[in-house]
Image (cartoon, grey):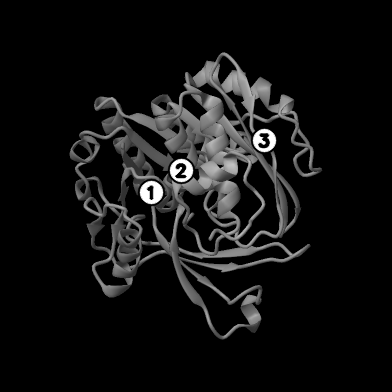
Amino acid sequence: MAKVVTLGEIMLRLSPNGQDRFIQTDIFRIIPGGGEANVAVSCANYGHDAYLVTKLPAHEIGQIAVNSLRRYGVNTEFIARGGDRVGLYYCETGASMRPSKVIYDRANSAIAEANPEDFDFDAIMEGADWFHWSGITPAISDKAAELTKLACEAAKRHGVTVSVDLNFRKKLWTSEKAISIMRPLMQYVDVCIGNEEDAELCLGFKPDADVEGGETNAAGYEGIFKQMKEEFGFKYVVSTLRESYSATFNGWKALIYDGKEFYQSKRYEINPIIDRVGGGDSFSGGLIHGLLTKETQGEALEFAVAASALKHTINGDYNLVNASEVEALAGGNANGRVQR
């Protein structure tokens, strides 16, 4: 299988039990996760040689994050140790019309303050097949944005396919700052993944679709897909299409464009959602596996959508499914019968 490298921050999520609110709980569960870490775990579950590149403190709290990656088969060889703190975020799980809520406590984390000399990106990219990052990484600090650029440059020197999940986070930066950083980085990208909000706020492209009103007709995205591919030279442009009826009931599908044809996936109704955190990351991990192993973009997209639909049924940030489980759902086995 392939060598897949990801770069980003792994944090510790602190969550109340069940659907308890922050103000009523006296217990928080510790759940490691983060955009690129989640992708690495997915790729490891599918049999790839997956790496997360990050920096974590040398103390025991940093080791919690390292151990969680090792538990699920992610290679931690390129994790630098040092700095003072692990980024934290608090997540309250919503229900029905009450949305989930995230509060960040990640300022001055080890990776946000990491320096170029902490990583040998040429050594990291040697023999790699795929490099993945998300818009969250350059958003956490100017230093992290510089690391992202250096990693992309090294990936291109080594002939590595580069994917990005645009992943705009309004609590980390403004759209103006995102556009100023993200657009120049697109010159290194082969596969661009994002939803309608990401495309607008990170790159300045707005689809003709009323997403808030639940209208996610793929035709509304075709124009901006063509514009994005023409401007940046992407090999693939991909978007998830989420119909959010409530915190626990979503419609879920996706669209991919390779410059020749559009392919729209089958649509899943996910109800009830157990945990939607990491849903987009599980899609990215599934898409990477699909594009590495499938013959057509359609097959790759169906794998990615099925993988991410399954993630919504699993607690925690990581998508803890294997390839055969995803293939079963993509092939139409969605009855949920007990496997004996």
Q: What is the x, y in percent for residue 339? A: 55, 58
| 134 horizontally vs 69: left or right | right
Mark 3 → mark 1, Cα distance in angstroms: 25 Å
Q: Are marks 1 and 2 in contact (CB under 8 Å)?
A: yes
Question: For this rendering, which residue is in front, 88 or 305?
Answer: 305
Callout count: 3
| Residue in the picture at 60% in, 58% down | 313
Q: Are marks 3 and 1 in contact (CB under 8 Å)?
A: no
The label shown at residue 40 is 1
Mark 1 → mark 2, Cα distance in angstroms: 7 Å
Question: For this rendering, which residue is in front, 231 or 75?
Answer: 75
Vertical relation: 248 (above or below) 145: below
Foreground disc of the pair 3, 2: 3
The label shown at residue 285 is 2
Q: What is the x, y in percent for residue 265? A: 64, 33
| Residue in the picture at 18% in, 39% down | 123
| Residue in the picture at 64% in, 56% down | 336
Mark 3 → mark 2, Cα distance in angstroms: 18 Å
Q: Could you say whether the residue bearing mark 1 is in a helix, strand or loop?
A: helix
Q: What is the x, y in percent for residue 29? A: 49, 75
The label shown at residue 266 is 3
Q: Residue furthest right?
A: 213
Q: Earlier in the sequence, mark 3 or mark 1?
A: 1
| 79 horizontally vs 340: left or right | left
